[in-house]
Each structure stands twice: as structure tokens, then as C-alpha cells.
Image (cartoon, grey):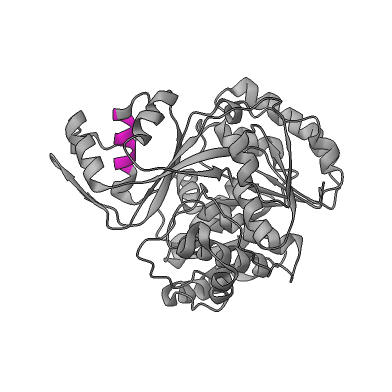
Amino acid sequence: MDGTVVLGLGGCVDHELTLSAPVMEQLIREYRIRADELTAPVAITDERELVISVLTYLQKGGGGEHYVASAATLRQFTQRFPIRTTLGGTSVRAAKELSRLGVPSTLHLVSINDVVRRLLPADTDYICSDDKDTFNPNVIVQYAQDLQVRAGDIDLCAPFPNRLIYANDPANSSMLLSPELGPLLSGARLFLISGFNSLRDQQLLDARLSSLQDHLRQLPEAAIVYYEDAGFHQPAFSQRVREALLDRINIYGLNEDEMQTYLGRTVNLLSVNEVANALESLRAFIPGPTLVVHTKYWSAALGEGDHTEALNEGIVVASTRYAHGDNSTHDDYTRMQTHPRRPDATEFAKALEHEMGGLIRCLPALQLDIPNPTTIGLGDAFVGGFLAATASPGSARVHGNGNGNGNGNGNGNGSGQ
């Protein structure tokens, strides 16, 4: 078992679906949903509230992640669409991208089943905290830019493509850590932490954080810890995780949705002044580590060290997934390396670096015009590319033909989400 790159902490099976206007319009009429109801529900307890949640995100082109109180509600919704079964979780999707780039890794999983065993890359090892098979798929909703939904008094058109995650997954909500994690970390050079966003019980979260801190004591001091943020089912818990782990995190990653949620405001991602102010506020909010923000227009690293290669690799890998999905090939990846950058993002990145000085590196997204892009798993693909370059500087260039499945934190045009 190769434990030099360890990715955790959870993983899952995903049922992916793509929204269609006829089905959504039928649901609006069936549940008599009105336009003035399109605000995010506090809780999702039935299919009507799930549909309202989806429509609310669709209206603004946003992405997000939510807990659904009933697994039956998820099954009811997915039965209305064709679905595709894949593997999910930031760590699992990052592992698949690392495998494509020729970097083996070991996963820490909290659930296992035959689907996971079948779809994991052959060069990806794993340990699992559960000694029995379980199967509780997440539902991943993808929608296209310009998807138009008209029914009753609702008339909306998605301004951007994006993805939504809806989960009822007891294993990831518990996040039991394997006793094998600490010994595995003793030989690690790179450790990815993700998945705490699924926990919903504060006492359980604190217990898991304490357990992880114990395991981290076996991690070599020189090892790099990358933490990828996500949409917390209990938003207040994100602060508890930071308080427990920030002193050991070297790189803290998040996407534009998470950044704007923490700031409590919308940020024009191509305004130098707005982004500079946002990053400075975020830096005060998340002190200490290098901060990595990946968006549909650009990706940036704020802090010490030169992460140019890692940012670029994240953008190229995410863009390859955006354009070609799970079926991307070595040639697709090679061509993407020389793909032109967005002119507006290129101008923005130069201006932002000038504005913020030497502590930031910002790279523009690629110029992509894809009729039916993949929006699922772009953030996870970015993380996989970033980690590959971090684990093997200068050598993350071997792109295989394996399957890459996505649920991720990304949205947008395949830049670094």
C-alpha cells in the first residue's frame, strides 16, 4: 500500500442526473409551486421542498450541497430522470484524477460496496472504517446554462451551468475514522482532508475532530496538509473545523460559492477591487495557511510559496473534465494544456496580481465553448490536478484513460472549479 499520498476522509456512490425542463415544469404544476416561494428551504423534508431548492439554485446559476431528511425523497426524485452511477466525494474523485496523472494514492473511506470496488482505479488503495457493505447514494443534479423552465407564474433561465448535491448518507454523516489512519499517515508526504461538511451532530463532530488530531500526530512535520472546503449541512460547523485544524493545514481550498457564503455577499469575479477586498476579508477569516480559491473565471493562491504549477494543473484537469467528462483521453488532456485563456480573465489576473502584490498568484481560466459541459466534479478535478503537481512537481503530465467520476465543489466553465 502506497501511503505517500493519503486522501480522506469519506467517499460515496453518486446517482447523477441532468435536469430537463419538461420534468421540472411537471413538478411545478404537480406541487403548485409559486415564484414567490423560490427561496432556499431551511430544511428539505419532502420532494416539494427539494424541487423548490433546485429551482432556487437554477434561477441564479448557483451550486450547493444539502442534507435531505428522507432517503425515500431522494429515490422519488431520481426516479423521474435517467441516472448514471458514479463515485463521489472530493477525495475519491481527486484520487481518480491523480491516477490519470500517474500519481498513486491511498483513500480513507467510511463506506464500501461492490460499486466502489469496481469503479476505483486499480492503482488506488484504500482503508475503510466500516467492516460491512453499505449503499446510500447521493443525488447529484446537473443543469445546463440557458435551461429555461416555465410553469405557472415561474419563468426562469439558468445564467450558468452548475451542479447540486443532495445527500442522506449515514456513513458520511458519522465519519467514523479507521484506527489504520494514523499508521498510514506516518509515511505520508501529502494528506487531503475533506468531508466534514456532511456531519450534522456537534458532539459527534467534536469527537471526530479530536480523533483526527490524534491521527495527525503521526503525520511527519514536513508533510503537506490540503483542506478542501464544501457546503456544510450545518453551516456553523465549518468554524469548529477550522478552529480544530487550521494550525496543521498548509493549503486551504474553496470555490466561489463557499467564498461568497462566508462573506455574506455576492462578488463580481471579474472586478479587481471586489475580488481583492473579498480575498483580504477571507484571509482575515481564514488566517494562517495558503488560501486557494478556484472559480469559473480564475484560480488563485494567496500566501507563501509558488503554487503556479499546481494552479495550472488544477485548471487544465478541471477544464478537461468540463469539456470531455468521464471519457476524456490523454490526447484531450494534452490539447487542453495549450488551450487559449479567457481574455477577460487574463486581463483580470494580471491586474489582481498588480493590485495585491507578491503574495498572490492568479491564473486565468481557459476559453471554452462547450454545448453540453460536465459540471459535476470540477472542484474535485481541480483538487486532483493541484495535488498531483504538489506531490510530484514538474512530473504531473501522464494522463491515462481511466474513468473520472464527479460530484465536486465546482461550477462554471471548467476553469478551476
Residue at the image point whose x is 69% and y is 60% from the top:
388
Residue at image location 35% in from the left, 33% down from the top:
77
Is residue 346 in view from this perspective? yes
Q: Is residue 292 visible?
A: no
Query: In this orientation, which residue lies closer to the viewer: 63 or 258?
Result: 63
> Residue at point 82% right, 46% down?
1
Q: Main secondary structure of the magenta part?
A: helix
Q: Residue furthest top?
A: 203
Residue at horizontal 48%, vertical 71%? 366
Q: Is residue 191 left or right of residue 331?
A: right
Give the quadrant of residue 113. top right
Residue in front for this viewpoint, 53 or 371: 371
Does the magenta segment cover residue 304?
no
Q: Tell me where the magenta segment starts and ends, as one range.
A: 48-56
Vertical order, 145 against 395 (above or below): above
Compared with 157, 32 (above or below) is: above
**Residue 144 in picture, x, y percent from top left:** 34, 55
x, y percent for residue 213: 77, 34
- In the image, residue 117 above or below residue 274: above
Total label count?
0
Looking at the picture, tell me which residue is in the foreground, 335 or 157: 335
Q: Is residue 382 left or right of residue 181?
A: left
The residue lying toward the viewer, choosing from 375 and 300, is 375
Q: Vertically, is 36 above or below 147?
A: above
Q: Position of residue 232 (x, y in %)?
A: 52, 36
Q: Is residue 108 left or right of residue 406?
A: right
Q: Position of residue 257 (x, y in %)?
A: 46, 49
Which residue sits furthest left?
A: 152
